[in-house]
Amino acid sequence: MPEEAPLRRNRDFVLLQAGQLLSRAGSGMSGVAYPLLALAATGSPAQAGLIQAARFLPHLLLNTLAGVVADRYERRRLMVMADAVCGLALASLVAAIAMDRVTAAQLLIVGFVDGCGSVLFGAAYSGAFRSVVPRSQLAAAASVDQARASTVRLAAPPLGGALYGLARVVPFVADAVSYAGSTILLLLIRRPFQAARDASHTSVREDLKEGLKFLWHVPFLRISALMTAVSNFSFSAGQFAVVVLARREGYSSTAIGLLVALVGVTTLAGSLISPQLRRWFSLRVILLSELWASFGVLSFIAWPNPVVLAAALAAQAFCFPNTDAAVAAYRYAVTPDRLTARVTSAASNIAVMAMPLGPLVAGVLLEALSPRAAVLGFTAACMAAAIAGTLSRTIRTLPALEDVVAEEGAA
C-alpha cells in the first residue's frame, strides 16, 4: 500500500479503529450504568464514588509498568489478552446481576479488573496506532481517532442509560460482547504492531527509567501531561456529580444518559473542526483551552441545576479532541518506536494520576456540602492551572506542531 494512501484506504488502520470503536461503545454503555448500579446497590454517593474510583485506579497504579510490558512483548497478543480479561470480568458481573446478588465488593473488584485490562490494552494500542499510520498522517489519524471516540461518547451513554432502564444487566452484556468483537478485528490486521527489535536485556526498572527520562526531558510532553492531570480530575468529578445530582432530582436513567452524552456532542464537534483549529491557533492556545473552559462551570454556581452542569462540562469537552490530537501527534513524532508504549504510558500515568480521586472527592463533597460548594471545590484546581499555565514562560515558547511533525523521526 502506498505510504500516502488516504486513511480510509488503509485497511489495517480501519480495522484497528473499528475494533476500538466497538470496544469504546461497550465501555461507554456500561460506563453510565456503573454509577447507576452502584447507587442502587449502596444508596450512598460516597460509596458509589469509591466504586467509580476503582475503575480509574489501575490507570494510576499500572500505566507506566504496562508501557514497559507493551514495549517488551508482542503488542497484538497483549491487546487480545486484555480484551479477554475485561470480557470475563464483565461476564461475572452479568451473572451476579442476573441472580440479583450484586454487592459493592464485587463492583469494586470488577471495576478494578476492567480498568487493569484497559490500561494494558491502551499501552499496546499506542504502538499499534503508530505502526499502522504513516508518519506524515499522524496528526490526521489522531483527529480521526478523536472523532470516532467522540461519536461513541455521543451515542453510547444515552443508549446505555436506556438499556439500563430496560434491564440492569443489558448494558453490561453489551460491553462483554464488544470485547469479543474487538479481539476478532485485531486478529484480522496484517501489519505487525511493532518494529523489529532485539530481545531486551535490561531490567524493568531501567526500562521504566528510560521512558520517564525521555518524557521529562521533552518540555511539551511533561507540561501537557501535568495539565491534563488537573483537567481529568476536575472533569471526572463533574461527570460523576451530574449523575448523582440528576438522580437526586428524579431523572430517569435514560435522561441521565442523555446528559452524559452532551459531552459526546461537543467532543464530536470539536474533533471535526480540530484540523482547522490547529491551523488557526498556536500549540500554547490549544494546550490551555480546556483549562480556561473549566470556568464555564461557574454557570452552575449561578443556577445549580444538573442540566446546567452537564452543559458546562460539554462546553469544556469541545476542547478535548483538539488538545488530545495535538499532544498525540507531537508525542508520536518525537518518540522512537522502541519507547512508544513506555513514553505514552508514562504521560498517561501522569495525566490520570488524580482521576480516581475525582468521583471519590465529588461523592464526599456532595454528601457533606451544598451542590454549589461541592462543584466549586473540585473545579478550583483546574481554574488555578489555567492561570498558572498562562503565566508560564515555558508554555509561551512552545514550538509549532507542524514544525515538530515535519522533522525526521528519532531512531
Image (tube, rainbow, N blue to C red):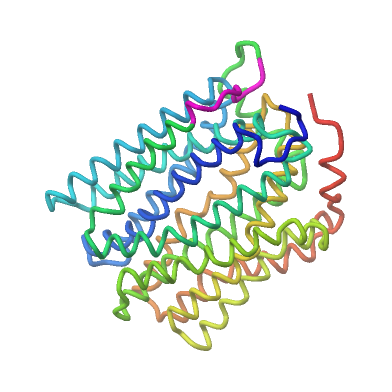
Q: Is residue 112 above or below residue 200?
A: below
Residue 47 at x, y percent in the picture? 29, 60
Residue 88 at x, y percent in the picture? 29, 36
Image position of 94 (left or right of 302)? left
Q: Which residue is drawn at 79% across and 65% down?
A: 391
Please identify the quarter of the rendering in which residue 7 is found.
top right
Please identify the quarter of the rendering in which residue 336 is found.
top right
Q: Residue at x 72, y 58 (%)?
A: 287
Residue 381 at x, y percent in the picture? 59, 66
As rendered, which of 9 and 160 lies closer to the eye? 9
Q: Which residue is drawn at 74% across and 35% down?
A: 5
As rendered, which of 264 and 242 lies closer to the eye? 264
Q: How many marks?
A: 0
As rendered, which of 87 and 116 lies closer to the eye? 87
Question: What is the quadrant of the C terminus in the image?
Answer: top right
Point out the stretch of residues depicted in magenta.
Answer: 186-196
